[in-house]
């Protein structure tokens, strides 16, 4: 009786579930999980700050409405409840839109109000930002409630070197200029350098391998989220500003005491094998990205469109191929990038602040949505009429699927690489395609090969026509 694995159109499960129903259920549950992560992120910051909503941001239905929708989605997609694939897919798109409002947008607004708005600055990326002669502390995860207190406390100790990992690290980089050592797939490499005294983690994208890995080295693993505990880790909760100050002091003192346990060979080995630091221009947001200049470039044909390069970096995917694809596209497109994709582009020297712009962490995809809105307004059109594309070429988590469908609900075309969130050859895919086209004037493209994606993009991209004649190919395709 499960899990459901249907391989042909004529097969059904013993309960009568068709391939399309199973596909729709799976997509809905995927989006629900992604929305839960983003909305939980926002709720945790609300709890940390005492429940104060940001000015000019009050989600319809109240701050808790998203959790009812997530619960209903899981209920609907349970066996024996919903059996209409179309209803499942409608719910998935509704939940993706809600994820954008109550997850991405709310979390970004809360971070801006409580931890500071990003400003354009120079930053440093990759493992070279670790310092052999210092007490190295890495902070990793997605919920940056500890960052201000930790950065302030670290600045009081000349022997402490603070670095970021993953999206908490991207937040630190954008707001405070703290160097970013690694994204998701390289988090184990941070510990394996042998010169990290403590890794402090909150939640999301934290590998379960870290406790075992830390045992192989001298690194102390510290958890701060009540939701995301790890076996064997030192737990120092961060539930309020007061606790954040206390935890920052305890974590740094723990790391400083731990330096004596570093292997004598570690520093020499690190110096011999480490890569050189990569410089990047970071800290872009909707208020400092020169939307007027980009709109003018779209109008006069200097660029052919704007691409969001977002989401994960999957080790099974051709990461080098995707980096080269975006490098080539940046010749006649503006590229806005976030999260792990932003780190990967930066690691290859592409974050120059000229055509490829680092916009922050994964929840900061809300900034892309706002830039798209402003560009459309400046061009006198709607988002769906603009040459915008959001690409998630190497998805790993459910969050990337929720983000992609959020942009589709805004009217942007969206591209997914493998693993695909839904089989593009199923009837469920056809239903979803029709919904995207009829309700949101958007389309989804599935392609896992960078070369084929690049060829498709070149084939369908021309100079941006004026607003009254704008139009895009509207197809739901597997290239």
Image (cartoon, rainbow, N blue to C red):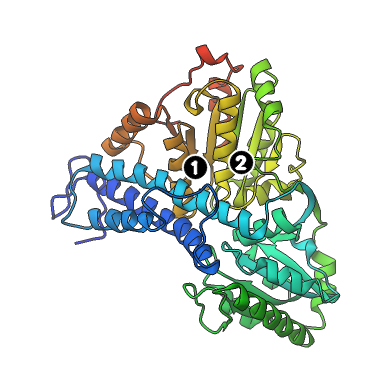
Q: Quadrant of residue 253?
A: bottom right
- Location of the C terminus by quadrant is top left
Give the residue at x 53% y 24%: 386
Would you name the residue on which mark 2 appears?
A: 322
Q: Tell which of 224 and 153 is nearer to you.
A: 153
Label 2: how many Cα within 10 Å (few below 14, some 14–19, many 20+): many
Quadrant occupied by the N terminus: bottom left
The location of residue 252, given as percent across then percent down, is 72, 79
**Which structural element holds mark 1?**
loop
Instruction: Decide if residue 412 is in sight here.
Output: yes
Left/right placement of residue 477 relative to residue 124 reads left
Query: From what the image shows, is residue 323 above or below residue 76?
Result: above
The answer to whether residue 190 is seen in the rendering is: no
Residue at label 1? 417
x, y percent for residue 35: 42, 54
* In the depicted structure, whether residue 155 falls above or below residue 251: above
Check if mark 2's residue and mark 1's residue have beta carbons within 8 Å: yes
């Amino acid at each position: 009786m499960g899990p459901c694995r249907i391989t042909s159109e004529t097969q059904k499960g013993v309960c009568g579930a068709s391939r399309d129903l199973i596909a729709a259920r799976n997509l809905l549950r995927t989006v629900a999980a992604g929305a839960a992560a983003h909305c939980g992120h926002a709720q945790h910051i609300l709890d940390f700050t005492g429940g104060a909503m940001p000015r000019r941001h009050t989600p319809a239905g109240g701050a808790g409405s998203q959790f009812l929708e997530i619960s209903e989605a899981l209920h609907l997609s349970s066996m024996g409840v919903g059996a209409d694939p179309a209803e499942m897919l409608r719910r998935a798109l509704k939940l993706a839109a809600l994820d954008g409002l109550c997850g991405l947008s709310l979390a970004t607004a809360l971070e801006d109000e409580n931890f500071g708005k990003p400003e354009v600055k120079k930053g440093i990326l990759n493992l070279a930002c670790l310092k052999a002669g210092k007490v190295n502390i890495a902070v990793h995860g997605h919920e940056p409630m500890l960052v201000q207190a930790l950065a302030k406390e670290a600045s009081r100790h000349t022997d402490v070197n603070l670095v970021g990992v993953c999206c908490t690290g991207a937040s630190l980089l954008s707001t405070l200029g703290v160097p970013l050592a690694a994204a998701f797939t390289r988090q184990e490499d941070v510990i394996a350098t042998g010169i990290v005294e403590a890794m402090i983690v909150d939640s999301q994208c934290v590998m379960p391998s870290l406790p075992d890995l830390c045992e192989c080295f001298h690194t102390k693993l510290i958890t701060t989220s009540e939701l995301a505990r790890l076996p064997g880790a030192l737990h120092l909760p961060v539930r309020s500003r007061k606790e954040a100050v206390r935890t920052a002091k305890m974590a740094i003192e723990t790391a400083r005491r731990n330096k004596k346990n570093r292997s004598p060979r570690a520093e020499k080995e690190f110096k011999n094998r480490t890569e050189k630091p990569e410089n990047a221009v970071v800290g872009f947001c909707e208020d400092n990205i020169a939307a007027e200049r980009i709109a003018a470039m779209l109008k006069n044909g200097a660029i052919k469109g704007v691409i969001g390069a977002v989401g994960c970096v999957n080790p099974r995917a051709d990461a080098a191929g995707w980096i080269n694809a975006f490098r080539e596209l940046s010749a006649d497109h503006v590229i806005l990038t976030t999260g792990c994709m932003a780190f990967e582009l930066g690691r290859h020297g592409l974050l120059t602040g000229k055509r490829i712009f680092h916009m922050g962490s994964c929840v900061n995809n809300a900034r892309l949505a706002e830039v798209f809105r402003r560009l459309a307004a400046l061009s006198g059109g709607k988002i769906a009429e603009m040459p915008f594309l959001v690409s998630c070429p190497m998805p790993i988590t459910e969050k990337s699927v929720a983000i992609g469908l959020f942009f589709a609900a805004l009217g942007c075309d969206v591209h997914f690489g493998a693993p695909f969130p839904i089989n593009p050859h199923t009837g469920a895919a056809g239903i979803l395609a029709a919904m995207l086209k009829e309700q949101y004037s958007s389309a989804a493209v599935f392609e896992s090969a960078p070369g084929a994606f690049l060829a498709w993009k070149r084939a369908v991209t021309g100079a941006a026509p004026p607003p009254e004649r704008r139009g895009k190919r509207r197809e739901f395709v597997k290239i």
